């Protein structure tokens, strides 16, 4: 019994340490992002200050008119902080788009920012140039998202669509290519990176929510991860020698 109690205490202690370490890591990442944003976006700090002070002043003035100005000031500060956090989120997203647009893996990173209700499988198809196709399952059905040079991505999309169609039957399958300077009249449809997730939400709702997971599971059986797929980085790819090294690995695994 004593040994069991001792083990339980050790487990609780280890869990607390892990939680503390995770919190410290998250705070460190937050401050790194904050410093990077403040350095590269000159409007960020003035914007945050203006939002908090402006919201607080408006709330205080409303309080003067209706009474309870100090309570309104307090609520205004809280509301200002919430609005500033939203502003921060959008500015960091914009910074990431500007920094990584056109980089292999940028579309995959963007798709991972989708809210609940979507199932994303990265790099279901890829060539040695790191042009890739990602599969997204949601209420519209299936969306195959290609990133890379359109003339190289199009055959990948066509091939993947044929594979998927054999499994999903009459479930709608949409195709998108993420590219800088998108041609709105092109086929398959092209979209710029910052507009990718918004475009996905504009497709019609064709399947019910309870069918999404079942459909995604069936599709996952289509492509157990190959060596080529596993070599694709999760997110925007670094430039230079590291990319060339990964490219050589992909060629060996893909046999190309």
Image: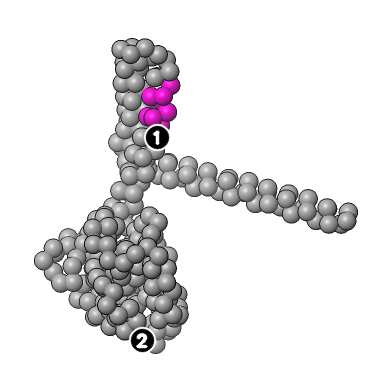
Q: Which disc, if any, is residue 256?
A: 2
Does residue 155 appear left or right of residue 5 in this picture? left
> Magenta includes 209?
no
Q: Nearer the viewer, mark 1 or mark 2?
A: 1
Q: Disc number at residue 82?
A: 1
Q: Classify residue 252 as left or right of residue 197.
A: right
Element marked by disc 2: loop
Front-most of residues 227 and 61: 61
Magenta region: 73-82
Q: Is residue 80 magenta?
A: yes
Q: Earlier in the sequence, mark 1 or mark 2?
A: 1
Q: CA distance from mark 1 to mark 2?
A: 51 Å
Q: Position of residue 229 (x, y in %)?
A: 41, 76
Quarter containing the N terminus:
bottom right
Work out which quarter of the rendered image holds the C terminus and state it: bottom left
Residue at image location 31% in from the left, 15% down from the top: 61
Residue in view at x 33 percent, y 29 percent:
51
Q: Position of residue 177 (x, y in %)?
A: 23, 68
Q: Can residue 175 be seen from the camera position used here? A: yes
Which structural element holds mark 1?
helix
87 in relation to 68, above or below: below
Q: Hey, which residue is sitting farthest right in the picture?
A: 2
Which is nearer the eye, 43 or 223? 223
At which x and y percent is residue 53? 35, 24
């Amino acid at each position: 019994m004593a040994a069991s109690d001792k083990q339980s205490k050790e487990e609780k202690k280890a869990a607390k340490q892990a939680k503390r370490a995770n919190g410290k890591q998250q705070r460190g990442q937050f401050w790194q992002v904050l410093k990077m944003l403040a350095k590269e976006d000159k409007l960020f700090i003035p914007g945050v200050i203006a939002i908090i002070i402006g919201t607080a002043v408006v709330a205080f003035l409303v309080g003067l008119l209706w009474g309870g100005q100090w309570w309104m000031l307090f609520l205004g500060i809280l509301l200002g902080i919430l609005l500033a956090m939203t502003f921060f989120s959008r500015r960091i997203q914009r910074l990431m788009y500007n920094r990584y647009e056109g980089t292999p893996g940028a579309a995959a990173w963007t798709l991972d920012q989708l809210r609940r209700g979507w199932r994303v499988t990265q790099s279901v198809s890829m060539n040695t140039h790191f042009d890739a196709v990602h599969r997204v399952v949601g209420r519209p059905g299936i969306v195959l998202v290609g990133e890379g040079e359109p003339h190289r991505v199009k055959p990948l999309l066509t091939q993947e669509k044929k594979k998927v169609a054999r499994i999903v039957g009459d479930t709608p399958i949409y195709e998108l290519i993420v590219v800088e300077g998108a041609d709105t009249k092109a086929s398959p449809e092209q979209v710029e990176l910052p507009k990718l997730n918004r475009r996905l939400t504009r497709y019609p709702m064709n399947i019910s929510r309870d069918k999404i997971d079942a459909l995604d599971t069936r599709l996952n059986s289509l492509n157990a991860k190959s060596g080529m797929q596993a070599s694709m980085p999760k997110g925007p790819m670094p430039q230079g020698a590291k990319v060339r090294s990964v490219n050589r690995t992909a060629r060996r695994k893909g046999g190309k």
